[in-house]
Every structure is written in structure tokens, then in C-alpha cells.
Amino acid sequence: MKITILYFAALREALGTERESVDVPVEVQTASELRTWLARRGGVWSEALAPGRALRMAVNRKLADPETPLSEGAEVAVFPPVTGG
């Protein structure tokens, strides 16, 4: 399945990229599985996407929970939580 991933804010800076298109393996079906798969790249990826790090994800411009399913052609945004004031 091919998806597009967009990275925002400090995450974009840490990873050195703002967007990528990837072919994910068949076992990657949800937002949380995608995060785990990306973190397995190692190095800065494993640090930036570590399980304890506060991150939000949106799939096709809708906020996602860990079990939100992915689909062919999906756009996934990954960003730090935002606070207002």
C-alpha cells in the first residue's frame, strides 16, 4: 500500500524531511503500526517516534487514534500536540 506522510514542526526538523511517499508492508494497517514501522528505521527515527513521545496523527485530514485504519493513497500527517492560550 502506498501512502504519503507529512511531518510538521519540530518533528520535521528532527527528521530532516517534510514529506515522503512510502510503500508500507501488508502488516502495517493502522496509524500505530505505521508509527512503529517508521521508528524501526533506527537512529533519529526511533528517537523522534519513540512510544513515549507525545505525537498526534491525522489520516486524510481527520485526527486519528492508534487504531485508525490506513488505506491505499492515504495522507498521514504526524505532528506534536498543540496547546492554545
Image (cartoon, helix red, strand yellow):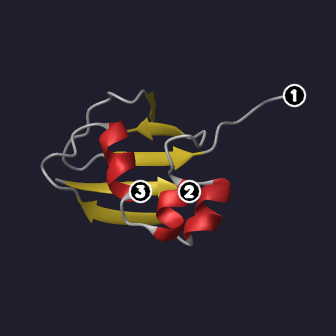
Dividing the picture into quadrants, the one containing residue 13 is bottom right
Q: Earlier in the sequence, mark 3 or mark 2?
A: 3
Q: Earlier in the sequence, mark 1 or mark 2?
A: 2
Question: Do the residues bearing badges 1 and 2 touch, measured as CB atoms within 8 Å?
Answer: no
Mark 2 sits on what residue? 48
Q: Secondary structure at mark 2?
A: helix
Q: Is residue 40 above or below residue 26?
A: below
Question: Callout 2, which amino acid?
Answer: Ala
Disc 1 residue crowd, few under 14, some 14–19, many 20+, Cα 10 Å: few
Q: Is residue 69 above or below residue 37?
A: above
**Numbered disc in front, either 1 or 3:** 3
Position in image of residue 69 (x %, y %): 26, 32
User: Is residue 67 visible to us here?
Assistant: yes
Question: Callout 3, which amino acid?
Answer: Ala
Question: Do the residues bearing badges 3 and 2 touch, measured as CB atoms within 8 Å?
Answer: yes
Identify the residue shown where x is 49% and y is 42%. 51
Identify the residue shown where x is 32% and y is 64%. 21
Question: Do the residues bearing badges 1 and 3 touch, measured as CB atoms within 8 Å?
Answer: no
Q: Which mark is residue 85?
A: 1
Q: Secondary structure at mark 1?
A: loop
Q: Secondary structure at mark 3?
A: helix
